[in-house]
Image: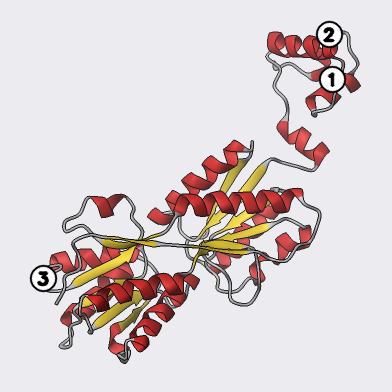
Amino acid sequence: MSATMRDVKNRTGLSLATISKYLNGGNVLPENKVLIEEAIKELNYEVNEIARGLVKNKTKIVGVMVHDIESFFSGKLLHFIGRELRKFGYGIMICDSNNDEELEAENLKFLVSRKVDGIIVLPVNLKGTFLKPARKRGIPVVLVDRAVQDEELDCVGIDNKMAAARAVELLLKNNHRDIAVIASDVEYTGVERIKGYEEAMRQAGIGVREEYVKTGRHSTETGYEKMKELLASPNRPTAVLMGNYDTMLGGVLAVNESEFSCPEDISLIGFDSLLVSGLVSPSWYVVVQPMEEICEKTVKLLLNRMESEEDAAPVKMWLGTRIQEGKSVRAI
């Protein structure tokens, strides 16, 4: 049977009030502190964190909702976010929205019911209505990677429009003109990256062909299917910008199964330098996001919101990107 606070009281001879004060971070006499710590060690007493949380109205748990836990990108974000939260003594409760807006709304309500201290969301939904239960309870929410279109909320990510435009500019500098894009038209990052693609093409005086804009949800399946369509087109593009890491995996698989080769027949550039991108041949040209820094700033912003009683204006942090060179793009 595990030791209780009353056992600590009997061992030390101190009052329950004094022991409780110490366990909850209050100041006690040095000699009493020594007695309590020795008793805790001898009795193997474990603090009931749930009970402590109810007293302090704090659980030391942060909820993290991701769009799809199978995504390599989500896994990396969870790793960095979890590591950063541990530095400050917080645990993490993970919810997978499985690219489903209804499930995402249910996950938000679940985290609110568990009285988490704050919530980090990589959203599926383009609108922020599903976050209302958290705001009603006064639980701080910070979006990561994706903003929402209808509300100004705290968010940390990159300038997706500019990042995509720079990727297209690299292709243009290599004399490509027939450039296609495969990206999501139902998620914030994809929508913004398509805008960046279109803007770069217009700036270069090149019309955007409807047949070159391939859309669907960011996934390996979308990348594979849409690349197949582009390769079968009588007006096959010479280069393709792929909207995220999973999309690029699918696109590369489609090229590898075809009669064409990269970069001889088709040049490819995508997003995120994750595990597989360093193992394939030819090596990929990719837009690299500072994922570790994004997660650090997300956690810091959330902790500031949790500790502050002021209702400050929403903060949007857009971090810079870089293009990692590879061998998947050739000059023509």
Mark 2 residue element = helix
Residue 51's place in the image compared with 169, above or below, is above
Q: Which residue is mark 2?
A: 12
Q: Which residue is mark 3?
A: 264
Q: Whole-percent x and y of residue 173?
A: 25, 76
- The quadrant of the rendering that contains the C terminus is bottom left
| Alpha carbon separation for disc pair 3 and 1 | 73 Å
Mark 3 residue element = loop
Residue 126's place in the image compared with 315, above or below, is below
Could you tell me which residue is drawn at 77 percent across and 33 percent down? Answer: 52
Mark 1 residue element = helix
Q: Is residue 200 left or right of residue 331?
A: right
Please tell me the numbered disc located at residue 241.
Answer: none
Occupied quadrant, residue 317: bottom right
Q: Which residue is mark 1?
A: 19
Q: Whole-percent x and y of residue 225?
A: 26, 73
Q: Whole-percent x and y of residue 57?
A: 80, 43
